[in-house]
Image (spheres, rainbow, N blue to C red):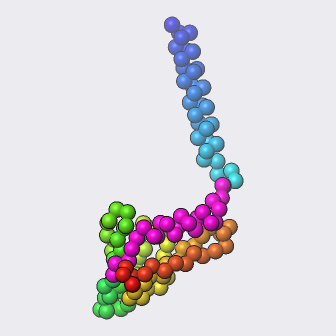
Amino acid sequence: MNKYLLLILMIISTLAQSEQKIITLLNDPFAVPKYVPCADLESQLISQLSLWQFRGYIADHDMGNSMKIFLQSSKTKTWLAISTINNPLEFLPWQINKLSPNEIHWKAELPMYCRKQLVTIMKLQGE
């Protein structure tokens, strides 16, 4: 009985060690990272932003130049209200660069190896 118990414990120990080695290999901080091509990153970011449509804004003259912008997702039909003061997590790494009554200028920093900044304009729906 003790032989079988010892055998089972050895098998479990071996499996646990091999599993740990796999996890360690996957999370190796010294491994060379795999770079995503810059063109693929650009297309992913543009498609992320193209899912949203600019529907309008409300200017708050009491608070200085603050504005609240309303966007709608073309995929899920959900609405999102963002202000010029903060950027929502849905749009990371995008940031509002410039805002006007009929368009939003967005910019996104690409990784350092791309040496590029992505800029795009979102027009007010219907214009």
Asked whether residue 16 appears in the rendered view, the answer is yes
Residue 69 coordinates in the image, percent (x, y): 35, 79
Residue 62 coordinates in the image, percent (x, y): 29, 92
* Residue 64 occupies quadrant: bottom left
Q: Quadrant of the C terminus?
A: bottom left
Q: Is residue 118 left or right of residue 125?
A: right
Residue 90 covered by magenta stretch = no
Q: Is residue 58 left or right of residue 7?
A: left
What span is in magenta? 33-56
Task: Tell which of 69 and 112 is nearer to you.
Answer: 69
Task: Tell which of 54 and 61 is nearer to you.
Answer: 54
Asked whether residue 83 appears in the rendered view, the answer is no
Residue at x 43% of width, y 74% of height = 87
Residue 113 coordinates in the image, percent (x, y): 68, 67
* Residue 25 occupies quadrant: top right
- 101 lies above or below 7: below
Residue 42 covered by magenta stretch = yes
* Residue 22 occupies quadrant: top right
Residue at x 54% of width, y 73% of height = 108
- 7 lies above or below 102: above
Residue 86 coordinates in the image, percent (x, y): 41, 76
Task: Tell which of 125 and 113 is nearer to you.
Answer: 125
